């Protein structure tokens, strides 16, 4: 017996649910890649990506996922033997650092853990110790989708400046761009990167990088540059060089539609929607946690992200809950990954989401907790409903 039918709902933190308008935007014949229409499409997207990053600097589009965009950043500003500082708050900054190590870069990890965000004071203290300025770049993520941590990138940027350190500040905004405030120029970020498949509501396959003048100056002497990722190659006068060859035309049409939808909603409203829905999820989890089995992975409330919530389970198998929600009810939760594999599940609340999607997901989780007899506080979904009723004005 199941109660699933129709469209399966993805509550995973990427790829996220794509709007029907975005899907329809791709349903068209191939475009003449040498046409004025193609050039106008590219120019508009590069311009608007810089708006999303909140920078006056140049943006680049790659046919790649986020891991490819990581590589694009690293190869354009680093040389073999350079040293970087990776700020740990979960899996993804560490993964970015691992990619750098494989390229011959010396990687130091500023140790954190999977239950907390980066501490800016610790960043400043470490940089003050680097009297010789041997650290060439600092890597951080705004939201770690494995741990659920939200890092205060503005405060980290201030800490770097307070230390008087010249290292490039490089930030992964894959799980935050288009969902939460991101101010590249105002926060002192030199290089930012993101991907298409989360807050930007577009199929996986596009990676984005924005680089300021300081990073572009370092780029001129970077020893890891390769033709495909190279910024200089992508700045050539021929349009095809923006993509190092044939453009990903249909993905670009999808992205154009998605960005138009974000701008039509207005970014401040998009950010508010994510904050309200994220808090609705947190209200539900807080109630469920009263059963002493479920709990937040991130200990401090202020360090929990507005795009994904990681829920740990004690003494019960989260895979069984994941299986029940998917097979019986048609809702796909995110699994625990990395250090949290087999210990947690994740609820995404990013991108193309609204109240019925989130409340439906929370309701299905509560159905699963009841069906599997997993101890939990009663009324989690009701707490989310109450929060939204109080917060969304009539």
Image (cartoon, grey):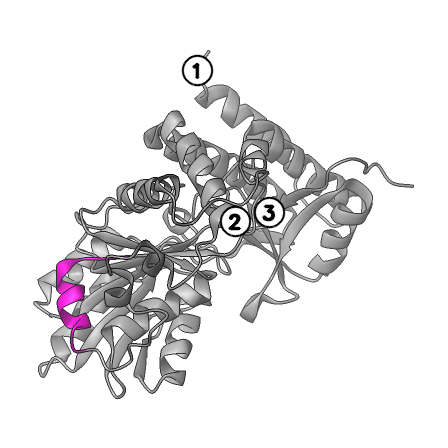
Q: Which mark is residue 309?
A: 2
- Report whether residue 226 is seen: yes
Q: Residues within 10 Å of mark 2 (few under 14, many from 20)?
A: many
Q: Nearer the viewer, residue 96 or 36?
A: 36
**Separation of disc 3 and disc 2 at Cα?**
13 Å
Q: In the image, residue 58 lies at what x, y percent?
A: 22, 53
Quadrant in the picture for residue 377: top right
* Residue interval drawn in magenta: 210-221
Residue farthest to the right, as pictured: 1
Q: Residues within 10 Å of mark 1 (few under 14, many from 20)?
A: few
Q: Are marks 3 and 2 in contact (CB under 8 Å)?
A: no
Question: Is 246 on the left or on the right of 186, as rendered?
Answer: right
Other residues around mark 3 within 10 Å, as few (<14) / some (14–19) / many (≥20): many
Q: Nearer the viewer, residue 246 or 296?
A: 246
First-in-chain label (3 vs 2): 3
The residue under label 1 is 393
The secondary element bearing badge 1 is classed as loop
The quarter of the displayed image where residue 41 is located: top left
Which residue has dot 3 on it? 289
- Asked if residue 123 lies left or right of residue 91, the reply is left
Q: Quote the CA–CA distance across marks 2 and 1.
A: 25 Å
Q: Work out whether 208 lies above or below 232.
A: above
- Tag 2 near tag 1, CB within 8 Å: no
| Foreground of the two, 111 or 291 | 111
Q: Earlier in the sequence, mark 1 or mark 3?
A: 3
- How far apart in space, not on screen, are marks 1 and 3 (Cα)? 28 Å
Q: Are marks 1 and 3 in contact (CB under 8 Å)?
A: no
Secondary element type, mark 2: strand
Q: Is residue 86 at all visible to an observer of this figure? A: no
Q: Is residue 4 above or below residue 336?
A: above
Q: Is 212 covered by the magenta stretch?
A: yes
Q: Is residue 297 magenta?
A: no
């Amino acid at each position: 017996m199941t109660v699933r039918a129709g469209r399966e709902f993805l509550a995973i933190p990427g790829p996220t649910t794509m709007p029907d308008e975005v899907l329809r935007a791709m349903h068209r014949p191939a475009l003449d890649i040498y046409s004025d229409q193609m050039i106008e499409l590219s120019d508009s997207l590069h311009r608007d990506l810089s708006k999303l990053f909140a920078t006056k600097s140049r943006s680049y589009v790659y046919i790649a996922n986020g891991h490819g965009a990581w590589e694009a950043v690293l190869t354009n500003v680093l040389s073999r033997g350079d040293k970087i500082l990776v700020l740990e708050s979960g899996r993804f900054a560490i993964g970015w650092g691992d990619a750098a190590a494989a390229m011959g870069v010396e990687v130091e990890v500023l140790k954190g853990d999977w239950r907390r965000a980066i501490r800016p004071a610790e960043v400043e203290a470490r940089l003050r110790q680097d009297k010789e300025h041997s650290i060439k770049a600092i890597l951080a993520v705004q939201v770690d989708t494995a741990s659920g941590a939200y890092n205060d990138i503005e405060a980290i940027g201030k800490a770097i400046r307070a230390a008087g350190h010249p290292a490039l500040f490089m930030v992964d905004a894959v799980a935050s761009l288009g969902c939460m405030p991101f101010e590249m120029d105002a926060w002192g970020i030199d290089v930012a990167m993101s991907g298409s498949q989360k807050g930007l509501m577009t199929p996986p396959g596009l990676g984005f990088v924005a680089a300021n003048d300081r990073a572009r100056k370092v780029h001129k002497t970077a020893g890891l540059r390769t033709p495909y990722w190279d910024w200089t190659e992508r700045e050539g006068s021929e349009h095809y060089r923006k993509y190092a060859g044939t453009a990903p035309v249909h993905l670009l049409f999808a992205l154009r539609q998605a960005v138009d939808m974000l701008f039509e909603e207005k970014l401040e409203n998009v950010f508010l929607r994510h904050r309200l829905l994220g808090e609705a999820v947190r209200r539900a989890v807080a109630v469920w946690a009263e059963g002493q089995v479920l709990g937040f992975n991130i200990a401090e409330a202020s360090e929990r992200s507005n795009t994904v919530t990681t829920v740990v389970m004690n003494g019960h198998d989260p895979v069984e809950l994941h299986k029940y929600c998917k097979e019986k009810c048609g809702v796909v939760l995110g699994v625990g990954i990395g250090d949290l594999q087999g210990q947690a599940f994740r609820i995404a609340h990013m991108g193309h989401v609204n109240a019925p999607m989130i409340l439906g997901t929370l309701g299905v989780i509560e159905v699963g907790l009841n069906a599997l007899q997993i101890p939990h506080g009663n009324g989690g979904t009701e707490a989310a409903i109450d929060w939204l009723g109080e917060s969304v004005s009539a």
